[in-house]
Image: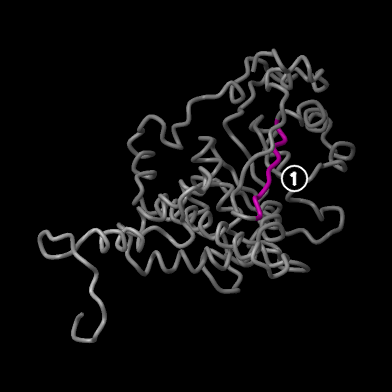
């Protein structure tokens, strides 16, 4: 016993008396709350990320990220009734969120090597993603222009509002959050290797949960950098005829680039009422190829695309209806 009467951990008879028991305790201290043996692969990987980060990141950084991960988990599952099942789910989501936040922190700071790999052009780095068959098609549009499938125009307002509703659970006014835009742009640039162009209303302000607080701010610089400065502002127009000016601008910017465009609006009104005949025909013909849809995972906050199962080369030819059985053996 020590001077305070507490039992000391037993040693293994070697060295300074710090034995196996203490070694196990030390390992457990860095294992990450909620990380246990026998978990599924994704959670095990998340636990490894948390464990490794606790060994290298400053304690205050880990504490800040853990606090945000906990808040995200509690908010994502706030609709569930209190129960043991909910507590277990919150723990699981918290670990997954914390691992994601650590990866994002590393990507922004270069600490995890992602930013460095991008700059050095390391094979396999996110920004150096090999060209996919779905990113290249040999066909041209009806005006003889090649498709730019590695470029995408993003409607920031649609993405930010969707994140506010689906992940943060916001209702009424003030749905938008810049962090949703950040996640989308980071995925599109680093995971897909695409050039991102943003479209947002002029002088637009919104909350940013990544920075904390409820103050509305202008476009964050890190998001602008993800777009390489290519963020286009839609003029503030008050007439009802121009109430969806950012949608129209998104479509027209994509047309000029002959590129993808990201927005979960179905654009039914623009398919029939777009004034420019050439652009309206282009939208009707190639919407299935170029109109890119997305979703946010409520539990983790992650962004991903909904891409369908018809090969790009067929959509580029205007072929939309394909027998499902034919897809089993069709070339990608």
Q: Determine the main secondary structure of the stretch shown in magenta.
A: strand
On the image, which quarter does residue 168 sit in? bottom right
Relative placement, left or right, of 246 versus 84 is right
Q: In front here: 31 or 240?
A: 31
Which x, y percent locates residue 254? 68, 36
Which x, y percent locates residue 177? 63, 61
- Residue 136 is a magenta residue: no
Indicate the quadrant containing the C terminus: top left, top right, bottom left or bottom right: top right
Residue farthest toward the bottom in the current orientation of the protein: 4
Secondary structure of residue under mark 1: loop
Which x, y percent locates residue 278? 80, 29
Instruction: Give the extent of the magenta segment.
Output: 290-298
On the image, which quarter does residue 235 sit in? bottom right
Circle 1 residue:
264
Q: Residue at x 80, y 26 (%)?
A: 285
Q: Residue at x 59, y 47 (%)?
A: 184
Q: Is residue 177 above or below residue 38?
A: below
């Amino acid at each position: 016993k020590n001077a305070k009467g507490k039992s000391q951990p037993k040693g293994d008879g070697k060295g300074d008396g710090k034995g196996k028991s203490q070694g196990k305790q030390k390992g457990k201290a860095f294992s990450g709350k909620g990380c246990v043996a026998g978990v599924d692969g994704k959670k095990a990987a998340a636990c490894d990320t948390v464990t490794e980060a606790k060994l290298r990141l400053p304690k205050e950084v880990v504490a800040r990220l853990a606090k945000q991960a906990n808040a995200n988990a509690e908010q994502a599952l706030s609709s569930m009734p209190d129960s043991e099942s909910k507590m277990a789910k919150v723990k699981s989501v918290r670990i997954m969120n914390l691992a994601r936040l650590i990866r994002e922190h590393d990507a922004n700071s270069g600490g995890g090597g992602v930013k460095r790999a991008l700059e050095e052009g390391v094979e396999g780095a996110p920004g150096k993603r090999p060209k996919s068959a779905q990113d290249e098609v040999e066909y041209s549009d009806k005006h003889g222009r090649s498709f730019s499938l590695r470029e995408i125009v993003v409607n920031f307002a649609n993405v930010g509002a969707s994140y506010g509703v689906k992940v943060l659970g916001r209702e009424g006014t003030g749905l938008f959050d810049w962090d949703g835009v950040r996640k989308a742009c980071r995925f599109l640039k680093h995971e897909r290797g695409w050039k991102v162009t943003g479209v947002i209303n002029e002088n637009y302000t919104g909350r940013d949960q990544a920075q904390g607080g409820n103050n509305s701010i202008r476009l964050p610089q890190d998001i602008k950098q993800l777009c390489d400065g290519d963020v286009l502002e839609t003029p503030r127009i008050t007439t009802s005829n121009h109430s969806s000016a950012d949608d129209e601008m998104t479509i027209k910017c994509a047309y000029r680039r002959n590129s993808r465009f990201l927005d979960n609006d179905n654009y039914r009104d623009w398919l029939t009422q777009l004034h420019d005949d050439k652009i309206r025909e282009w939208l009707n013909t190639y919407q299935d190829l170029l109109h890119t849809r997305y979703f946010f995972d409520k539990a983790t906050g992650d962004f991903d695309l909904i891409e369908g199962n018809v090969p790009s080369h067929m959509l580029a030819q205007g072929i939309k209806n394909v027998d499902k059985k034919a897809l089993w053996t069709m070339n990608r």
